[in-house]
Image (cartoon, rainbow, N blue to C red):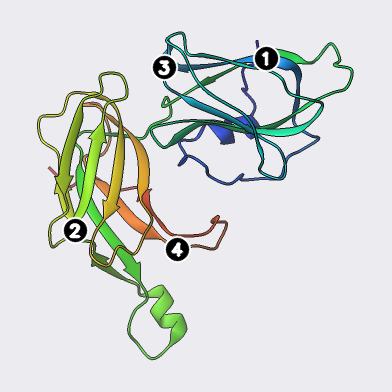
Amino acid sequence: MLRFRTIAALVWCIPLPAMACSLAACVDRGVETERNFAVTIQHQGKPLQGVSIKVTAPDSTIKFSGVTTSKGLVEVAGLVPGDYWLDASFLGINAAYFCFHVSERPSHRAKRRVQYDWGDLAPATRQVAGRLVDSQPGKGESPIWNLVHRVNVPIAGAKLTLQNPMTDEIHSAFSDQSGSFAFDQISAGVYVLHIDGGSGRPYEATDLLIRLSLNANKDRLELVRKEAGGGSCGGTSLELISSQSPAR
């Protein structure tokens, strides 16, 4: 059974939006698998049901799709020799996104099973509360000064949905005129935070993975609009940035 533990492979385990473009080109055609192989997805050491598994060719043609069972398992079958990408996602968050190939004559290294963890690297916070802002250039006469002295404009009226992937517990909230939001009486655990709408809607719908824990070092979530470019795959989204907890 294959479990990625190298630094390069861990890049694909970072909680990313589903259908995120690759962070690097496929190296050496990726791992080799057999024509039929199993994909297993876990969350906190337990099988995760309902994970979408999609296999595409380099031209983006879908060659296989399926959903994990109660055992967290999908059997990928019927692949002809060639190069592929596998995308595993759940509630808008990737569990895996990697390239692989099937050989005409599989070698002894060809994998029959691959396994991934979903949600285990979620950033932690003591409460699900924070602020949504659009970081815009300043209004001075110098373009360079404007880029350095950016202004945070609140994103009001955005709908936020908090979902527990294991219990299907769902909570909703809206950002106010200052861009602030808060969820009250939420149990500890891992959640998917879905954010949509807002004043002017200057970003695409965003899915983020967070962990609610009383032992977290921070207690606020600062989400800033991320512009396309600089390594982005296009479009704009809300990016969770590091935030210091207020002094107590």
Left or right for 188, reference 66? left
Q: Could you give the CA–CA distance between mark 4 and mark 1, rounded to whole angstroms?
A: 38 Å
Which of discs 2 and 3 lies nearer the camera? The answer is: 3
Give the alpha-carbon distance from disc 1 to disc 2, as whole Å: 46 Å
| Sequence-first disc among 3 and 1 | 1
> Badge 1: few (under 14), some or many (20 or more) residues near its Cα, within 10 Å?
some
Does 135 appear above or below 99?
below
Q: Residue at x 75, y 31 (%)?
A: 30
Q: Which mark is residue 37?
A: 1
Q: Are marks 4 and 3 in contact (CB under 8 Å)?
A: no
Q: CA distance from mark 4 to mark 2?
A: 18 Å
Residue of label 4: 227
Image location of residue 99, percent across then percent down? 69, 33
Residue 63, placed above or below residue 23: above
Q: Position of residue 159 (x, y in %)?
A: 21, 49
The mark nearer the N terminus, 1 or 2, is 1
In this rendering, which labeled residue sits more in front, label 4 or label 1? 1
Q: Is residue 241 visible?
A: no
Against 28, residue 239 (above or below) is below
- Image mark for residue 150: none
Residue in front for this viewpoint, 7 or 202? 202
Q: What secondary structure is marked by label 1?
A: strand
Q: For residue 179, which numbered disc appears in the image?
A: 2
Residue 46 image offset from top left, x and y in percent = 41, 10
**Would you name the residue on which mark 3 appears?**
49
